[in-house]
Image: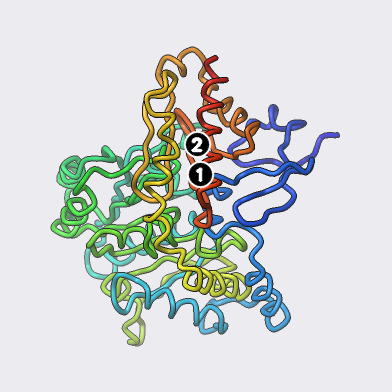
């Protein structure tokens, strides 16, 4: 029987009747409806940073549901978990006196960041600064502004015109960023969006010095630097927010995914005090940000996040992204030099990509998906992205899981081209 569920990013003609149903999870593993166990080598969709099945989350969510199940934050309404979470995130932020805007997912806060960037300049006497620059292969969700600022062309195809006022530059060149700012005119550019490590675009690592140079270019030209850390934050790069691995000061930071370990949808936008200032004057007639998702600051989601932050601190998980980056690269070393592989990208944070060779892709454009299936047969779940596969294991993964991943990659590649 056909099921009416419509999956994101899926060929539904192929999916219907061929669903892979996950029924439970524990630690770094999940089980399918046939009872088989798999190493969750992508932490689901980059977010199960502490794995699955933590009782602390269940306890916190249950307690909050019994106390206050929901209420909005619009106007002067507030709830205790949202207030506490905002304080904790602000204390961790790489700038003092930051402000926290809460949403339900990364796409929410990307759109929020675009709006705040433009509104900031409207309310500081620079209304022409509305242009936003993204990077090739950058991914910033699938909301309207996020699709426009993203640099993966296929994600914007078939939807008609995108939002205006966006352009893209090479992901690895601060010089290209400056040239684009000058082309558009610094008096017209509001913001630049940058993932510290590009995730869904193929795990593209920044060249040495790129992040520092890009921030300097932005600040020199009066352009806001927005660090999209939806994937990079909460230990994935070995720090709280990912961008704080570099000694730079972003103007805004988008976060989601690991903020609750994926247990309940939540996102947070961290805004520097300078950017937020026009909205926090306390003066009569001060501007109001007329924007906000229904579930902003949902008390149950915030309770899950508070429990998540406790887990990260108690278990010492935040540094793990840096501690495990070399072991992950070592685990994938068997794919380096393989005749089917063009490149293995690893070594900066607990994520990596295996890109297939041009001849393999030319012979079979569906090879990444086939490699995913072959690795699933070996008991390891990965994601096909672009020209290969990507991995981003839970921060609780250990030697046994990395050994399993390394063995599965080699076996799967052998079957793919054998």
Residue 245 in view: yes
Quadrant housing residue 371: top right
Depth check: 6 or 373 in front? 373
**Residue beneath the point at 49% across and 12% down:** 363
Residue 270 position, x and y percent, is 38, 68
Residue 195 left/right relative to 59: left
Determine whether, in the image, residue 276 is placed left or right of residue 317: left
Which residue is identified by label 1? 402
User: Which residue reaches farthest top?
Assistant: 363
Q: Nearer the viewer, residue 179 or 250?
A: 250
In this view of the protein, which residue sits in the foreground, 71 or 385?
A: 385
Of all residues, the one furthest to the right in this rendering is 1
Give the SS element for disc 2. helix
Residue at horizontal 73 percent and vertical 36 percent from the top: 19
Q: Disc 2 designates what residue?
A: 406
Instruction: Return the x and y of residue 101 as percentages of the image width and height.
Output: 44, 70
Image location of residue 410, percent across then percent down: 51, 28
Residues under numbered marks 2 and 1 in contact, where contact means CB atoms less than 8 Å apart: yes
Residue 349's label in the rendered image is none
């Amino acid at each position: 029987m056909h099921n009416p569920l419509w999956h994101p990013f899926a060929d539904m003609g192929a999916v219907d009747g061929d669903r892979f149903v996950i029924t439970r999870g524990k630690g770094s593993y999940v089980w399918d409806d046939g009872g088989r166990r798999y190493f969750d080598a992508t932490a689901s969709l980059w977010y199960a940073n502490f794995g699955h099945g933590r009782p602390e989350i269940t306890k916190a969510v249950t307690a909050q549901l019994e106390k206050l199940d929901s209420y909005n934050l619009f106007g002067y309404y507030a709830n205790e978990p949202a207030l506490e979470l905002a304080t904790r995130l602000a204390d961790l932020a790489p700038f003092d006196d930051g402000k926290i805007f809460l949403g339900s997912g990364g796409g929410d806060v990307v759109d929020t960041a675009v709006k705040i960037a433009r509104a900031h300049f409207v309310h500081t006497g620079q209304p022409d600064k509305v242009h936003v620059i993204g990077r090739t292969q950058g991914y910033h969700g699938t909301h309207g502004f996020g699709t426009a600022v993203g640099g993966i062309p296929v994600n914007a195809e078939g939807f008609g015109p995108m939002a205006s006022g966006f352009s893209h530059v090479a992901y690895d060149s601060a010089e290209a960023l400056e040239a684009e700012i000058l082309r558009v005119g610094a008096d017209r550019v509001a913001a630049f969006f940058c993932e510290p490590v590009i995730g869904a675009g193929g795990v593209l690592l920044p060249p040495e010095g790129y992040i520092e140079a890009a921030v300097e270019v932005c600040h020199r030209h009066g352009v806001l630097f927005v660090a999209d850390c939806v994937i990079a934050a909460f230990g994935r790069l070995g720090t709280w927010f990912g961008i704080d691995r570099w000694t730079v000061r972003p103007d805004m930071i988008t976060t989601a995914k690991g903020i609750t370990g994926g247990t309940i949808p939540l996102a947070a936008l961290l805004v520097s005090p300078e950017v937020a200032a026009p909205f926090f004057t306390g003066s009569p007639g001060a501007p109001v940000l007329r924007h906000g998702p229904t579930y902003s600051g949902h008390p149950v989601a915030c309770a899950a996040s508070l429990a998540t932050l406790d887990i990260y601190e108690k278990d010492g998980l935040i540094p793990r992204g840096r501690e495990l980056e070399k072991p992950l690269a070592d685990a994938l070393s068997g794919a380096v030099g393989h005749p089917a592989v063009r490149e293995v990208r690893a070594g900066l944070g607990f994520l990596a990509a295996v890109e297939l060779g041009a001849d393999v892709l030319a012979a079979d454009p569906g090879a990444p998906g086939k490699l995913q299936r072959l690795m699933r047969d070996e008991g390891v779940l990965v994601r096909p992205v672009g020209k290969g596969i990507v991995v981003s294991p839970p921060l609780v993964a250990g030697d046994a899981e990395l050994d399993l991943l390394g063995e599965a990659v080699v076996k799967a590649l052998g079957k793919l081209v054998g």
